[in-house]
Amino acid sequence: MYYVVDVVGTADELIAWCGFVGAWLLVFGPLNQAIRELQEEEFERESIERAVHEIEVPPPVSPWWLVVPPVYVVLRRRRGRVYSDLG
């Protein structure tokens, strides 16, 4: 007995399975990348939280300096610069 292989049916199934696998790869690739990026952000977040607890916040500029606004702006910028340089 000879078995007749349905080549057309097998090719259609192969194409359907390739499409199915390709579609899942299109979903899995970006999903995998998103998971890795979120893990990197979590790592950076932990280091930022650690730095927040280690660095002292400079005292705020007195509101009385608002009487002379340019001096107030300069003082705030200096304190902000010192605070950002500590991190």
Image: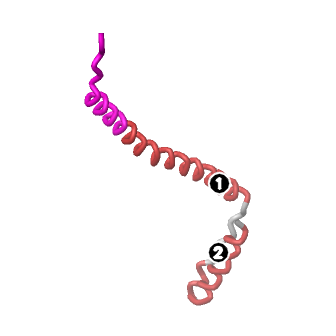
Between the residue at mark 1 and the residue at mark 2, the CA separation in whole angstroms equals: 18 Å
Mark 2 Cα shell of 10 Å, populated few (<14), some (14-19), many (≥20): some
What element does badge 2 sit on?
Answer: helix
Q: Position of residue 52 (x, y in %)?
A: 67, 58
- Is residue 70 depicted above or below 80 in this figure? below
The residue type indicated by label 2 comes to Gly
1 vs 2, front mark: 1
Query: Residue at 69% across / 70% down in the picture?
Result: 58
Q: Which residues are magenta?
A: 1-20
Overall secondary structure of the magenta section: helix
User: Residue under circle 1?
Assistant: 49
User: Residue under circle 2?
Assistant: 80
- Is residue 80 depicted above or below 56 in this figure? below
| Residue 61 is one of the magenta-drawn residues | no
Q: Position of residue 68 (x, y in %)?
A: 58, 90
Query: Residue at 72% across / 63% down in the picture?
Result: 56
| Residue 13 is one of the magenta-drawn residues | yes
